[in-house]
Amino acid sequence: MTMVKEYRTIYEDGIGEIVEKKSRFICHIFHVTTQEEAEAILEKIRKEYWDASHNCYAYCIGKKQELMRCSDDGEPAQTAGRPMLDILINQNLCDVLAVVTRYFGGTLLGTGGLVRAYSGAVKQGLLESVIVDKKLADLLKITVDYTGIGKIQYLLGQEGFSPTDTEYGENVVVTVPIPIEETKRMQTAIMEGTNGRAQMEQLKQMYYGEVNGEILLFED
């Protein structure tokens, strides 16, 4: 299966809430990878919030948003599920489920008001979540003597590539994810910059992303 070069998803689930004319809109954001997983979570939410007026949802599953579903759960057509789905689509989110639970406050919001409320709840839920942009990379292991490590650190820093591990022993061993389209160019630059003293090994292809200033590796 061909791996996509980059996609955006949820790293940490979140819960957000807004209030519109005394109606509460509680949004849960989940990372999901299958329709079965999404449906199981939906069933759990429905049981937990059994006394709510509505439990509307939207999800995008697949690294290219191949599977999309949404539901108004009794709200007027196109006022809940579809606006929620539009937020996920517009933010290019994959493998994500949004569920908005509404507790009716006694005042009708109208079509436009419902669209704004459900959209706003999802936006708030996403603000309370942690989103990560995952990029496909070659995990590169670079071994060099101490006279060459400064040049390698400079070259990586110039490109904005951050090592995930650096070991200091007889030589210095740096492990760093390099976007697949940049690997050959960086290998050439490192060889030239160290006058051929660096040894390089491509360990494997995997995704990496930055979360709270830290570079993380992902096996998916």
Image (cartoon, rainbow, N blue to C red):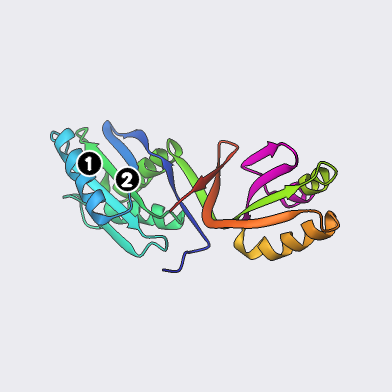
From the viewer's side, name the closer residue of 200 and 57.
Answer: 200
Q: Which residues are magenta?
A: 155-178
Residue 205 point in image, percent of width and height = 53, 58
What residue lies at 84% left-to-right and 55% top-to-bottom? Answer: 193
Residue 99 among magenta residues: no
> Is-magenta flag for residue 156?
yes
Frontmost residue, 162 versus 58: 162
Q: Amino acid at mark 1?
A: Leu
The one nearer the camera, 90 or 199, is 199
Q: Label 1's element? A: loop
Of the residues under marks 2 and 1, which one precedes in the sequence? 1
Between the residue at mark 2 and the residue at mark 1, the CA separation in whole angstroms equals 14 Å
Residue 113: in sight, yes or no?
Answer: no
Query: Which residue is labeled 2 in the image?
Result: 118
Disc 2 marks a residue whose amino acid type is Tyr
Disc ID at residue 108? 1
Residue at the spot 69% in from the left edge and 65% down from the top edge: 184
Residue pictured at 54% horizontal, 50% vertical: 208
Q: Name the spot of residue 98 as percent of width and height, x first.
A: 32, 46
